[in-house]
Image: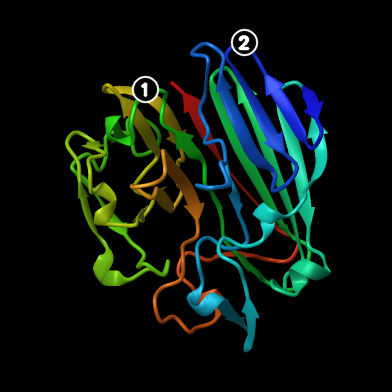
Amino acid sequence: MEKNGTRFKLENEELSIEVDCHGAQLSSIYDKKAGREILWDAAPEIWNRHSPLLFPFVGKSCDGVYRHKGKTYDITPHGFARDMDFEPLLCDMDECWYRLLSAPETLEHYPFSFELEVGHSLSGRTVTTMWRVRNTGFEEMFFMIGGHPAFRVPEGKTIYDYSFSFNQEGCNQGKFQQGLHYLAPNDKGLEEEELGGFLELSDGRVSLTKGFFDRALTYMVDGAQVSSVSLLTEGKPYVTVLCDNFPYLGIWKIEKTHPFVCLEPWYGLCDTLGFTGELKERKGINRLQPGETWQRQYSIRID
C-alpha cells in the first residue's frame, strides 16, 4: 500500500489500483502485464470522472427535486457522495476502506442520518468494490446506490471494435442469451416507458456498431437479468463486470465524443417522466430500518 496525497495505491504482480479520498472513487486500474490503463483518465474536456460512486440517488430526479413526507428537496443527479471527501478508515496491502457520515450539508438535501462505507480490494486480476450503508437515524431510510466505472478503449482500437457478452458466469449463467429487456431515459435523463425495448443478442453477444446508442441514450437493463457483462475486443474478453443479483445494469457512453464505455451496476434508477409521488414510491428505491446495515459488492476483472 502506498499513499500519494489524497490517493491510496494497492498493487500486486498483475495490477495496481488507485483510490481517491474524494468520492472514494476508484481512479486507476493499471494492467502491469499488458502495460496499459483500464479506466478512463477523467479528461475534463470530455468527462471528468473515472468511476464515480452514485449515492444516495441513481440518475436524475424530475425537475431536480423529490418529495419526502410532504416536503420538497433539491438533489443533484446521482446524489452528492461522488463530490465529497471521505475519511480513510483502513488501508493495508490489498484492501482500503473509506467512510462518509451524514452532516448538516447532506441533511439539507437528504433528510436521513447515515454512515456510508466504501471498500476496494485487489486479488489477482480482480478488483472488488464493497458498500456498507447504515441507517444511523430514527426513521426508515430510503436510498439508492450504484457504480459508474468507465473503461477506456485500448490503444489502437475504437469503440466499434467492442462487443458485449452477457451472463457467461454468475447466478444467471447461460440465461437471457437471446435478448435483454431494457428501460431507457429521454434526453432529459428521465425514464420514459415508450423508449424501452428489447436488445437482441446472439448467444449472449452483441456488437457495438455505429448508431448503437441511437436506440437508447443509456441501456438500463432491469429485472436483475445480468450477472456478468464483458467488453470483448477481437472476440476475447477485455474486462468483465461481475454483478450477481443487481436489479439494474446501465450501459452508457456518448457515442460521438466519448472514447470509453461505462458498465454500471445499480441498486436504483433515474426518475420516471412525470413522477410526482413520494420518495418511498420511486422505482428502484431501497429501504433501511433504523440501526440496520445494508451490504453489497461488485467486481471488475481484467481478462
Q: Residue at x 39, y 24 (%)?
A: 238
Q: Position of residue 210 (x, y in %)?
A: 23, 43
Q: In this picture, is 69 found above or below 227?
A: below
Q: In this picture, is 148 found above or below 181?
A: above
Q: Which of marks 2 and 1 is nearer the N terminus?
A: 2
Q: Position of residue 168 (x, y in %)?
A: 32, 30
In the orientation shown, which residue stands out farthest toward the front?
45
**Residue 69 seen in this snapshot:** no
Q: Position of residue 42 (x, y in %)?
A: 57, 41
Q: Mark 1 points at which residue?
A: 156
Task: Specify the amino acid type for callout 1.
Answer: Gly
Q: Left of 83 or right of it: where is 205?
A: left
Q: Mark 2 points at which residue?
A: 13
**CA distance separating discs 2 and 1:** 25 Å
Q: Nearer the viewer, residue 288 or 302?
A: 302
Task: Specify the amino acid type for callout 2.
Answer: Glu
